[in-house]
Image (cartoon, rainbow, N blue to C red):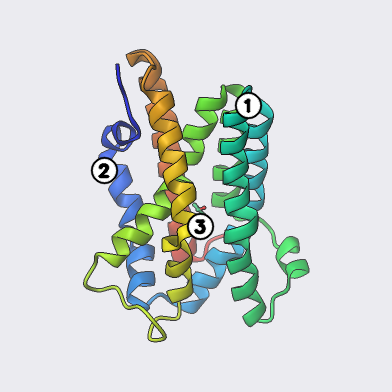
Amino acid sequence: MGYRFDDLTAACQDDWRRYVEHDFVRQLGAGSLAQGAFRHYLQQDYLFLIHFARAYALAAYKSRTLADLRQAHEGLKAIVDVELGLHVGYCRDWGIDEADLARLPEAKATLAYTRYVLDTGNRGDLLDLHVALAPCLIGYGEIANWLNAQAFTVRGEANPYDAWIAMYEGDDFQGAMRAELEWLDARLADVTPARFQELSGVFRDATRLEIDFWQMGLERTD
Ligand SMILES: Cc1ncc(CO)c(N)n1
């Protein structure tokens, strides 16, 4: 008993490292990622985020207390007000407007991950849903911090993806990530070992789907 968020990553350490330190992430940090790969990823991520915003809305619906409602609202705000602005901005620079984005077909990796999270949240309780969402919000915050600690990472105008790193290391996103960590630490503190095993399975599956999402970007697969 007395679990915390770090126990979830520890329970799937290899998958977690494969996600955070994926080749897509390394190339993005180094600025060497092919523009077509980033573009494919970012367009799919736009579709992804719309479904993830729905998942936070589901978390709001499942909330019994004002504190839980506020936490779901934080996640929803991070997506709608912080992240999607970056996606729409980058795509506008490439001549793709929001109507074009909304018409894109979803890649299988996008379908699999988003629908997995929504299904897990529908079937389970609020904690299942937040655990399924955690690799996303907490993972990307960790990825930005990890990139900043790597010697190969290039910052500033020399890296075409600098704005991406800047958004995920920024106060808005990092604040949302810390709030989610605290919420999860508080909820995990009193789960039983059997329940923790169940939640670890959800967390690991979502992490594996994150790896597939990077791979989809790198290989530009539909
Ligand atoms: C696939 C994916 N995972 C996590 C995040 C962070 O919100 C994102 N934007 N996209």
Give x and y (percent) for residue 71. Answer: 56, 37
Kind of residue at badge 3: Asp
Residue 191 lies, with reference to residue 66, above or below; the image says above
Could you say whether the residue bearing mark 1 is in a helix, strand or loop? Answer: loop
The residue at which mark 1 appears reads as: 63
Label 1 crowd (10 A; few <14 / some 14-19 / many >=20): some
Comes first in the chain, label 3 or label 1: 1
- Horizontal and vertical percent position of residue 120: 56, 29
Residue that label 3 marks: 172
Q: At x 46% / y 59%, what residue is drawn? A: 171
- Pick the front one: 66 or 79: 66
The reply to whether the C-beta atoms of the residues labelled 3 and 1 are less than 8 Å apart is no
Does residue 50 appear in this view? Answer: yes
Q: What mark, if any, has residue 110 been given in the picture? A: none
Tell me, for residue 14, which label it has, or none. 2
Residue ranking furthest to the front:
66
For the N terminus, give its image quadrant: top left
